[in-house]
Amino acid sequence: MNQLITSFVEGGPVVWTLFIFSIVAVTIAIAKLWQYTIQLRLADTAPDRALDLIDAGDRSAALQLVADRKSLRARIVRQVLQVFEQAGLAPDEAREEAMRQARVDAAELTSYLRVLEVIATLAPLLGLLGTVMGMIEAFKAMEVAGANVDPSVLSGGIWQALLTTAIGLAVAIPVSLLHSWFERRSELEAAAIENQLQRMFTAEALFRGRSKPALTAAAA
């Protein structure tokens, strides 16, 4: 343990930077897990039940069902219904506004994922840089020592140099796995949201189609 702490202290800027990278990655991972737990709520069936009510033409019941829900898909259903209820919006305008709001909400799913991607890319490169710099220093010391070089000192310098590569990989591998999982989860949720929107747009078109004959009959 003491040797590990000494290696970290003496590791220089490369090891310190990798340590900061690891702290940032862990912080983002915890924040994203909390965000997904709160916003996605995979067990929340309210959005699907609301869509069934919308298909049946009962918008008020659908809106009441998702009124107090905090999941992302429930919030989007609520917002789209509110847009459809706005007076003065043509069908195309209502569709564009609903898509705009959905894109803003869905963008939260991928927030800070680019930071994880950058860390996963840079960590092994920084580790390799630290190794190259350490090897340079070790061979410079060997050159200065000339014939009196101590093999144990040289091997110790090389060991410390290779340590930076190990630390870089130790940071990059789990961060890369986390980034891939978060990205895939976001893609699946975005696809579900897109399917949800298309279903609501179809229901809205049918609703407006059913309303037109009634308006025509009333005018006659």
Image: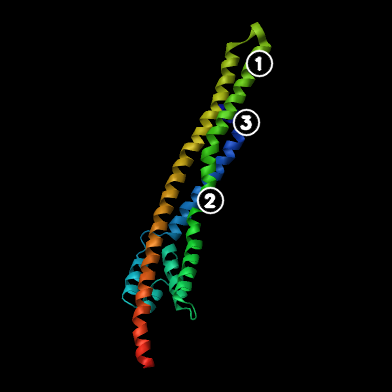
Q: Nearer the viewer, mark 2 or mark 3?
A: 2
Return the mark for residue 141.
1
Residue at point 57%, 20% (across, down): 158
Residue at point 41%, 49% (across, down): 184
The residue lying furthest to the top in this view is 147
Sort mark 3 into few (<14), some (14-19) or many (20+) by Cα contacts within 10 Å.
Answer: few
Residue at point 53%, 32% (across, down): 167
Specify the amino acid type for callout 1: Ala
Sort mark 2 into few (<14), some (14-19) or many (20+) by Cα contacts within 10 Å.
Answer: some
Confirm whether residue 1 shows in the render.
no
Q: Which residue is mark 2?
A: 112
In the rendered image, the vertical position of residue 220 relative to residue 91, given as above or below: below
Residue at point 40%, 75% (across, down): 64
The residue lying furthest to the bottom in this view is 220
> Is the residue under label 3 in contact with that under label 2 (CB below 8 Å)?
no
Question: Could you say which is closer to the camera, residue 53 or residue 66?
Answer: 53
